[in-house]
């Protein structure tokens, strides 16, 4: 039926004329009161395009959102938002976790939840956000891959020269790969052996002191400096967009697996804690906003903990006698005998 007041066709599924008239009266009343909402719907791809346009203006990580969205579209296809239910989202979780980590699945589901919220804000979705009824997968962030010393030697021996320099630099600064790719000479202070950069992920300043190995890499790059970027492409002078291929080739030649650029950051942090560096200092070097993010590396400093408690040896001037179980039994028996003797003595005194 056509609503002449709002210019929309209102569909109600009933063949009963009286009931249809009742529906019409209710809807007309809603229109007059200004509470009638015209049914809307949109497909996930259409919402995705609108969301990415929004993210480009408001989020630094919009490219990452595009990658997450691609995984959602691969599973849901051109589904209407109204057809995406908690059940289908849980099916996505079950299938997706077979290929990627639970943390990645959670990031993808979190994006879907945010997109539903934006669709509601833009008037493109009515009703409950189905992701609110879905539980996120448990994540085990305490498990991470690090690079052993033997693995490091094998990897460096199989790297191309420019990749080798970046691997050494990453192991000695702990920077994320994106910050290394886009590091400029303006952010490098060779005289004071310091990096002063803005972290791309958080847009916050970070100071990183340079040890001998990291400084050696920068000095070598400085002699062949081309353009504004420290690790720029020698052919274009622009930063490398991605060096995953170069690292994978080196790993294949070295017969190593399970290693990514981020593994080098984990290795940097793990080696610091193993050498007794406190977690607050590690947090500052990594540029973490909260200490709880750094706590995942706390388990790797077991040797430092052992050294710490060993320093307490000899600090106590009290002599402690350790009793064996046999001697404890004899003491208990003697106490019982003395107690029995006192009871007997009292009995004799009362009789007298």
Image (cartoon, grey):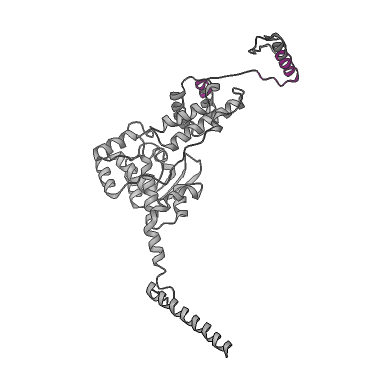
What residue is shown at x 44% (from left), y 38% (from top)? 103
Q: How many marks?
A: 0
- Quadrant containing the N terminus in the rendered view: top right
Residue 253 x, y percent position in the rendering: 24, 38
Residue 266 drawn above or below residue 136: below
What residue is shown at x 37% (from left), y 49% (from top)? 268
Question: As rendered, which of 79 and 24 lies closer to the eye?
Answer: 24
What residue is shown at x 46% (from left), y 21% (from top)? 77
Q: Give the image quarter of residue 231.
A: top left
Question: As rendered, which of 327 and 259 lies closer to the eye?
Answer: 327
Answer yes or no: is residue 45 visible. yes
Magenta region, main secondary structure: helix
Residue 140 drawn above or below residue 316: above
Q: Give the image quarter of residue 221.
A: top left
Magenta-span inclusion, residue 40: yes
Residue 214 x, y percent position in the rendering: 35, 48
What residue is shown at x 48% (from left), y 34% (from top)? 61
Question: As rendered, which of 205 and 290 lies closer to the eye?
Answer: 290
Q: Which residues lie in the magenta part?
A: 23-48
Q: Give the image quarter of residue 323.
A: bottom left
Magenta-span inclusion, residue 244: no
Residue found at the far front of this picture? 351
Query: Is residue 38 shown left or right of residue 160?
Result: right
Residue found at the far bottom of this picture? 352
Residue 52 x, y percent position in the rendering: 51, 26
Residue 173 drawn above or below residue 41: below
- Quadrant containing the C terminus in the rendered view: bottom right
Query: Is residue 308 shown left or right of residue 42?
Result: left
Question: As rendered, which of 259 and 229 lies closer to the eye?
Answer: 259
Answer yes or no: is residue 210 visible. no
């Amino acid at each position: 039926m056509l609503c002449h007041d709002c210019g929309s066709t209102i569909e109600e599924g009933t063949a009963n004329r009286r009931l249809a008239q009742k529906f019409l009266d209710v809807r007309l009343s809603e229109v007059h009161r200004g509470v009638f909402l015209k049914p809307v719907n949109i497909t996930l791809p259409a919402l995705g395009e609108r969301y990415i346009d929004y993210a480009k203006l408001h989020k630094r990580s919009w490219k990452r959102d595009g990658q997450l969205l691609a995984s959602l579209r691969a599973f849901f296809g051109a589904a209407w938002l109204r057809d995406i239910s908690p059940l289908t989202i849980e099916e996505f979780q079950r299938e997706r976790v077979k290929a990627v980590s639970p943390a990645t699945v959670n990031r993808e589901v979190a994006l879907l939840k945010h997109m539903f919220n934006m669709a509601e804000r833009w008037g493109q979705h009515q009703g409950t956000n189905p992701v609110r009824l879905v539980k996120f997968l448990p994540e085990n962030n305490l498990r991470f891959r690090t690079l052993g010393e033997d693995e490091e030697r094998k990897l460096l021996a199989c790297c191309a020269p420019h990749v080798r320099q970046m691997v050494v630099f990453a192991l000695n600064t702990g920077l994320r790969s994106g910050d290394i790719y886009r590091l400029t000479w303006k952010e490098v202070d060779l005289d004071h052996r310091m990096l002063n950069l803005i972290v791309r992920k958080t847009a916050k300043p970070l100071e990183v002191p340079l040890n001998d190995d990291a400084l050696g890499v920068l000095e070598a790059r400085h002699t062949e400096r081309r353009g504004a970027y420290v690790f720029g492409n020698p052919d274009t002078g622009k930063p490398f967009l991605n060096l995953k291929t170069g690292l994978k080739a080196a790993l294949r030649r070295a017969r190593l697996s399970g290693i990514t650029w981020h593994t080098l950051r984990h290795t940097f942090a793990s080696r610091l804690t193993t050498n007794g560096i406190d977690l607050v200092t590690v947090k500052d070097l990594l540029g973490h906003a909260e200490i709880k993010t750094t706590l995942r590396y706390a388990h790797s400093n077991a040797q430092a903990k052992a050294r710490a408690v060993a320093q307490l040896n000899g600090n106590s001037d009290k002599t402690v006698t350790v009793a064996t179980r046999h001697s404890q039994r004899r003491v208990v028996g003697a106490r019982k005998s003395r107690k029995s003797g006192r009871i007997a003595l009292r009995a004799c005194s009362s009789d007298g």
